[in-house]
Structures are given as structure tokens and as C-alpha cells.
Amino acid sequence: MMIEKTVETKCDKDVWQDFKREKSYALSYIYHQNIDFLFAYGKKFTSDEELVLDVIQDLFCYLIEKRKQLGKAENIRMYLLKAFRRRLQKEIGKRHRERELNNDLAIPTLEFTIEEEVILEEEVEEKQNEIRRGLKKMKSQQQEALYYRFSCGMDYEQVSGVMEISVVLARQLVSRGVNVLRKHMKESGFIFFLFNWKKF
Amino acid sequence: MTKNIYTKKSVEQLLEDDAFIALVRGGKIDWEEFLLQNKDNKSSLLEAKRIISALQFSEDRLGHKRKIDLWQKLEIVQLKSSKRYLRIRILQSVAACMLFLLSLGGGFYWYNESMTADYEFAANESPVQKGKTLLVLSTGEAIQLKHEQATIKVENEGKEICIVNDTTLKNLEPAKIIKKEIKLTEVVVPFGKNLSLTLSDGTKVWLNAGSRFAFPQKFEGKYRKVHLDGEGYFEVAKMKHHPFILTSNHANIEVLGTKFNVSTYDADDYSETVLLEGSVKVMGRNKLLNEKVIIEPGQSATYNTTEKKMAVVEIEEPEKNIAWINGWYEYKDVSLDKVLKKLERYYNVKFIYDENKIKKALPISGKLDLKSSIENVMPILSGVTGVNYIITSNYILIKH
């Protein structure tokens, strides 16, 4: 899961142009380069795989049909990610309203969870699992910002662009998220220490 | 090189540093070495590194098949939106006929101690779309056959399997009985290929494209049992005391000695048996009703697995049903979707169409030379049925 800044950008611009000019390889390239990422990313907002796939399909259909009118894309993945997030948000909101008829004014915020349940991966050291558990203590927006910053390697401008918030707020979300994690690490580290200390 | 940059930074500063994040995400550096070089700042580096690596997750993956399915849908969208989209006009001619033949499928199932469990193919690649014709021995060894139209004979009372014009596999021990289950030999005939086969009792079998067939190298016990997913024409050697039983996932057929054609593809929802000589008992695989019919030469029995219904009809020229053995198809009043499915198997092509619309199309009749290419066949089909089509490298899109 990479958002490469330097290497792919130049190339992306050309691929995008080719896509707009209906060169047939471009769609295939764009789809196959990004489908895994979009699917995994979508799953962070909902566990409903069909919904994620529907939105991906709608997004691509839109791109194909409107390709002549589309703007430039310096970074295709960023472009797709933003467009996809917006559509997903709309769709989840729509379904939510359909379920809760009496509450049709409330627009739910996009719920982002890095992992539903923290899976204890054997190859990940215990301390890292401890850090992941700390994610549960923070707001969805903070988790989302941390995900873009550290899992995807985005800079703050990109984070703010995707989340449609200011750069200042993006920075705040990340730094508060980091503080929660560090605090959690210290607490659990201390408990860990006490627990082991008794043994001696 | 990394030394000076990182010695003085706090955890917060490290987490603000794009290059440091990239370093951890890249996972390509030797951390022990790195921490040693920067040992003055070891604890901050370690903490920052832990936080970043804890946020690298294994991601949910989309299965290959779904990825491809979605891609195919998008390709069609792209095709439709493209200016280069070919529109082939159709002549609404009533006359011409196309066709091919359809073997009648019959469902049959012999549900007693002689045929209990379903057979599972060892070669379980179900849509046998690609590659060469395969012979899978009871030992599990798979042999690729070189010819498009291969011929195999089991000889010497099951001790030898001979691939005509190829190699003879000698001294094959007859299948061993393991846990009372006899391991069968299998052949897999991909789309676009066919095969003829002589079994150890002298029964001759022709297998059409896209079929899998399992048979014992040597028949033992009271019943001669074989299993089919696909279409085959059988000339069963007469053995009064050893009924020949063909099982499939839709229906079973029991015969003594006879000639019949059966089309019983797992992928279809019916099994159609046409009898040319002798008599056969066809049994739909509906365990509750155990529907069975005995048909006579010139009749066909079709068992529909969705509706769980058996239909017997008279066929005017039953030998047309086995025309495929000689490379052509002849069909009369056959639905378009059946014709398309046959063509898919024979030519190893994929049609994409709206099933509901296709099912409403009028039945068609005709004759089709399977030796001519799909490019020649499609204009004729289009002329008869009035559908538009687009041939691409991966599939043929049918439009209404």
C-alpha cells in the first residue's frame, strides 16, 4: 500500500492523459494497479464487501463515461482515493438513511476503523500489538489520519486533501493520535513491567 | 550517512520526518546496524519505529475471480462508450437456419448401493477452458495429449492404455482398491477439443469439447460404472449381467448394451439423453422422487435440475444428435442460449449476453460446420437471430 510521490508521478500524468484519449491499455493499467488498494481501503469504512465493490464499479464507470471531461491527475492513486472516499461516504450515508427513516437529517460521519479486531499477527512483536490496541481509544478521524500518514506514507497536504480538512487540522489529528498511542504504550509497558517484576 | 540526521531527534520529530517514515515503511534497512550507528538516540528511534511499523497492516484481499469479474464488466462499459464500437446490422431474415445439435440430455440417477456417493474429479478444474487434453491415471499422474482430436484405447484387459499416434503406456497395474473405493482414470477435454476412447470392455466413447470423464481402467464387480461432466456419445458393449451405469451431477443412466448420446454439463441445468439403439433407463437425481423413465430409440429424455422435471420427446432424426462426432452440429427448434453454450465449448470462446433477453429469443434451427471459424459462424447466427455482436480478444458481446 504505497502512495509514491516521486517515482510514479511523471508517469501517472501520462497514463492519465492516455486514459482520457481512450488508449485501451490505460484503463487496464489503472484498474489493476489500484483495485487491491481501493478494496482494502474501502473495507476500512465498512465490512460490506459488496458495497465496496459496487462503489468501485460506479467510480470506474463514471471515469470511463466522463473521461473527456476529467481534470488532470498528477497522482492517480490519490485521485482515485479522493473520489472513492467521497462516493463511499455518500453511499454509506444513503443506506444509513434508508434504514433509519425517522432520522433522515442526521448525516453519519464516516466511521473509519483500521482493524475491526486487532489480529495478533505472530510475526508482529507483542509491543506492536499493544500499540494497535491503543487505536481503539481514539476517534475514527484520528485513526483515519494516522492511517494516511503512516500506513500510506502521505504528507500532510495529501492527508488534508483526502479528508477534506485543513492542513492544520490534519497535523493536529495526527499528533493527537500519536500522543494517544504513546500514552497507551507507556501505560501498558508499565503494567507489563509490574507483572513481570512480581515474578522475580 | 543516516548517522547525523537522526541522532538528536525526538520521537515527535521523527514522526514528522517523511524520510524516516519512508525508511521504516520500506523495511529494507538493517535495524540492529542502524540503532548501533545511532546509539545515543536509540530509545527514541526504537519507539518511533515501533509506532510506524505497528501501523503497517496486512490488508483485506480481493479474490482473483472477483477482480477479473469486475474487470470484465468495466471492459464492456469501456467498449460501449468507445466510438470504435462496431455495429453490425442484422438482417431480420426468417429463413436461414443455424444450428447445431443438441444432444438430449437425460437425467438419470441410479440411487442404490451400486451408486451412492457423488464422484469428485481429481482433475477438478471445472471449466476446462484451456490447455491440452489430459489423461489422469489412477495414480494421479497426468499426461498431456498432443492431438486436438485424441484417441485412447484401454487394452489387454485394462493392463495397457494406448494413446493412438502417441505413446503406449504399458504395464499399468489395474487400479487398486483402497477403502473400497476404486480409483478411476480421468480424461479432461478442454473447450475446442474432442476425444475418442475405447474402454476395457470394448465400449466406445466420444467426448465433446469441455468434458470430463472418469472410468476404471478395468471394470470389476457387477456394474460398469463411469462418471461424466460434459457431452459424450456412447456405444456400450453388450454384457447382459453387467449393467453399464453412467452417473453425472444431474442424472444417471443405466443401460445393458446400446448407443446413446448424453449432454450433462455441470454448468448447465439440464441433462439430455438421446437414444439411438437399445434401451436406457434415465433417472433424475432427485432423491425424494427418484424420477425415472425408460426410453426407446428415437426418443430423448431431458431432466431439468432446476424444475426437477423429466421430459420425454420423440426425435425425428436422432442421428443428428451425434453429428458433432463428425465435426458439425445440427439443431432444430433449439433456444439461442443453448446454441451459444454449445458454441462456447466448441470454439473455446466466451459470450456475454443478457440471459433474460436471450431466453425470450425464438428457437432456431440450422446446421453448423464446426470446422469453419467462429468469425465465419457469427454473421450467420446474427442473420438468423437478429442479434448484434462484437468480437473482442477475450469474449463476444451479444447485443439486442
Image: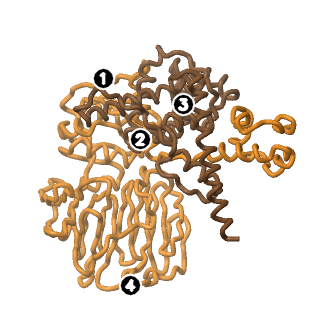
2 and 3 marks on the same chain? yes
Query: What is the spatial separation of the Cα atoms under label 1 and label 4, in whole angstroms?
Result: 60 Å
User: Is label 4 or label 3 in front?
Assistant: 3
Residue visible at 81% across and 37% down? B6
Give the image location of residue B340, x and y in percent.
30, 43
Label for residue A46? 2
In the image, B121 versus B91, the foreground residue is B121
| Shade of chain B as shown in the rendered figure | orange
Residue visible at 75% across and 37% down? B10
Q: Amino acid at mark 3?
A: Ile
Give the image location of residue B90, x and y in percent.
27, 25
Residue visible at 20% across and 55% down? B306
Q: Amino acid at mark 4?
A: Lys
* Residue B74 falls left or right of residue B143: left
Query: What is the spatial separation of the Cα atoms under label 1 and label 3, in whole angstroms?
Result: 34 Å
What quarter of the picture does the N terminus of chain B occupy? top right
In the rendered view, would you say A181 is above or below B273? Answer: above
1 and 2 marks on the same chain? no
Residue denoted by label 1? B89
In the rendered view, would you say B8 is above or below A128? Answer: above
1 and 3 marks on the same chain? no
Other-residue count near label 3 (Cα within 10 Å), few / some / many at <14 / 14–19 / ≥20: some
Q: Amino acid at mark 1?
A: Arg
Residue denoted by label 3? A30
| Shade of chain A as shown in the rendered figure | brown
Residue denoted by label 4? B180
Query: What is the spatial separation of the Cα atoms under label 4 and label 3, in whole angstroms?
Result: 54 Å
Query: What is the spatial separation of the Cα atoms under label 2 and label 4, in whole angstroms?
Result: 50 Å
Q: Are marks 1 and 3 in contact (CB under 8 Å)?
A: no
Tell me which numbered mark, 2 or 3, is placed earlier along the sequence: 3
